[in-house]
Image: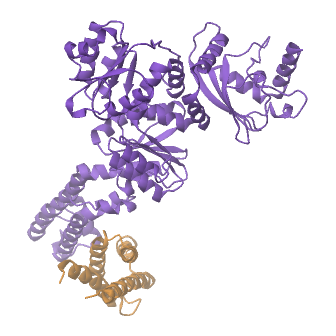
Chain colours: A orange, B purple
Amino acid sequence: MNTQRVWFAFFIVLALTLNFGFFVGEIDNPLHHNPYELFFALVVSLIATVLKIGDRSHLGAVLLATSLVADLQLIVAAVMWGYAAQVTGEVSVSVMASIVSLAGGAMLANITSVILLIAETIQLKR
Amino acid sequence: MKFNMRRRSRIRGAAMWLLLLELRTPLITLIVTYSISVLGLILIPGVTPEGAAYHLSFLDAFYLVSYTATTIGFGETPYPFTPSQKLWMLFVMYSTVIAWLYAIGSVLTLLSDPAFRRLRSYQRSVSRIHGVRDPYWIVCGYGGAGSQLIRFLDQSGSRCVMIEVNAARADAARLSDLSYQLTILVGDVAEPQTLVDAGVQRALCRGVLALTDHDQVNLTVATNTRILAPRVAVYARSATDANTRNLRSFDTEVVVDPFRVAARSVTQFIRRPNAYALYHELVDPDLNQIEVVEVPVAGHWILCATGRMAETIVEAFVREQIPFYLVSSRSTVIQGDWPWIEGVGTEAQTLREARISEAVGIVAGTDDDGDNLSILLTAQSENPTLITVARRNKPTSEPVFGQGHFDCVLREGRIIAQEMYARLTTPLLHQFLGQLETMPEALVDGIIEKLNARLAGDRPELAHFDLTLDGKEAPGVIPFLQTVMTPKLGDLLVDPGLDHPSMPLICLLLIRLNGDQVPFPGDGLPLEEGDRLLIWGAMGAHHRLHFLVRRVDLFETVLSAQHQKTA
């Protein structure tokens, strides 16, 4: 068992699960979406991105790209939420819907990432 | 730190990847410390001045951590901290600042790592080579030959890319005084990837010059180039006959054996001084004068030589039937029926045994510069009229050999550079030199006399160039070629100015479109379209010639004036 591979898979899967946890619920209901969950989803996604750096194979490049997409979507969602809460002073229903849909997009990227991880694992010869 | 040098094919961007790879741990450390710090600040309750409990927002927390981590420290916002918040802030300060220092330290360590810097400079060279838009030669090895040849090529406007394995020599190459910035790749030229990185497979690569001091390396370069880029010409240095045959067996364009060339040069210097002088003026861009040293025909020579130099020079002297005494150590004895004296030649006694007082000249050809100088100085004191031929081994000994008043100095690097330069610049010159080998000495003397007559006592710097009679190079001449005017060779070498005096130029070789060669053609030879001419004479006169052959009106005036003269 390779400890490095464990951490690698752990963070990639955790990024997806946290992302999913934030995403589920009514799209425009702030009560269904926990800000802490978004925070952790973003942090874990950033760590996953850094872990993916350094693999110069084609698969490695695609994995890195999916992670960068997820980061981008989550950062935009977080910034939007912060702006709405602090500057506008009110998180409206439409803003909440946008934040959750951005997180949904990030989730798609994370799903791709996990699928690639699974595909790579299945190809491994024992 | 480990560099995977075998994957240089993807060298571009490798340094960037390496940097990111090294930054993985510091980056993760930063992310984790930041997120823990932010989370802690949000979870720990604060107190407003009115006494109400509140929690920092994500924005406030991130803002606070950011200015703390970067040691800016704006203070406690939005309200003064409670003791529990202060405790947490202590953790935030130390952990984030340390995380930053760790990250910056890692970057600086990597940037100053010698291996990383080598990789970066290699990468920069590779990307520069691949950005070059002019044709270039790849020169392998910055030794005596390499440095000389790069200078020669620069004088004729050709560019080079240098591959050198030795970092100290590469630094010397960086200081070379050229009209362009020489691109230097520090790497092992015997590795195929180095050649690929040097751009051997690009269409702009004109040829590979394998000039390292090691035959085996030159051979590897030649074979690798044959396979990697079959259309690229290979010019190689070879110091043994076996290696020369090996290189020739797979169509290496030019193989230069410095020992054979040196031996040939010495016998040419003795038996055919005019051909020797003409040859060296033509192949050496630094030598712009004809200097003929008259060597007495009668009398014997003393050869002090070791190793391969002794073999080749004895062979050449035997072939040319020049009488000689061989002075060599016992280890380099060569069988044959010629007088042999054991010794180095640095002692007067040895030289006296070789009957130095009656000798014509002496060749100091050992592989030690100190010995060579000692031989020549001893010989000169024994017989001041002696003709001296010196062999210079190390380029660093040049000052003493240059000032030593020797009649002929054999410099290995320069010999190779000259031989290759003659073949690189114009194919016409190479063909002419082939004919010069067998040309009778009287004819060569005639060529020099003819030029001297045209120079009329001046001693300008000499140069050679080639001219093709086609629509591109000589549009002024083409319209008259098929007419009754029948321009002759002599009409070209005429000053377009007043009175049309003949220019200080002569034609050494004319090659017809069908391949017929006319060496040293007379002025009355009619010109044809597609003729290629090798012209030699005063530097500067070729500007006037180029001017003349481009202008129809000028050439017509010259032609009619010439016709009137003959009529």
Asked if residue A48 is positioned above or below residue B336 in the image, the reply reads below
Q: Quadrant of residue B417?
A: top left
- Which is nearer the eye, B248 or A112? B248
- Judged from this view, the residue extending furthest toward the bottom is A25
- Which is nearer the eye, B514 or B43? B514
Residue at x 29% of width, y 49% of height = B118
Q: Quadrant location of the N terminus of chain B?
A: bottom left
- Which is nearer the eye, B557 or B278? B278
Q: Residue A48 at what x, y percent from top left?
A: 29, 76
Q: Quadrant of residue B453?
A: top right
- Which is nearer the eye, B220 or B259? B259
Q: Residue A62 at what x, y percent from top left?
A: 40, 76
Left or right of B336, for residue B41: left
Q: Quadrant location of the C terminus of chain B?
A: top right
Asked if residue B474 is positioned above or below residue B403 in the image, the reply reads below
Asked if residue B101 is positioned above or below residue A119 in the image, the reply reads above
**Total residue callouts:** 0
Q: Residue B482 at what x, y percent from top left?
A: 87, 35
Instruction: Say if residue B534 shows up in the picture.
Output: yes
Q: Quadrant of residue B102?
A: bottom left
Q: Residue B471 at what x, y percent from top left?
A: 77, 38
Asked if residue B89 is positioned above or below residue A77 in the image, the reply reads above
Instruction: Say if residue B179 shows up in the picture.
Output: no
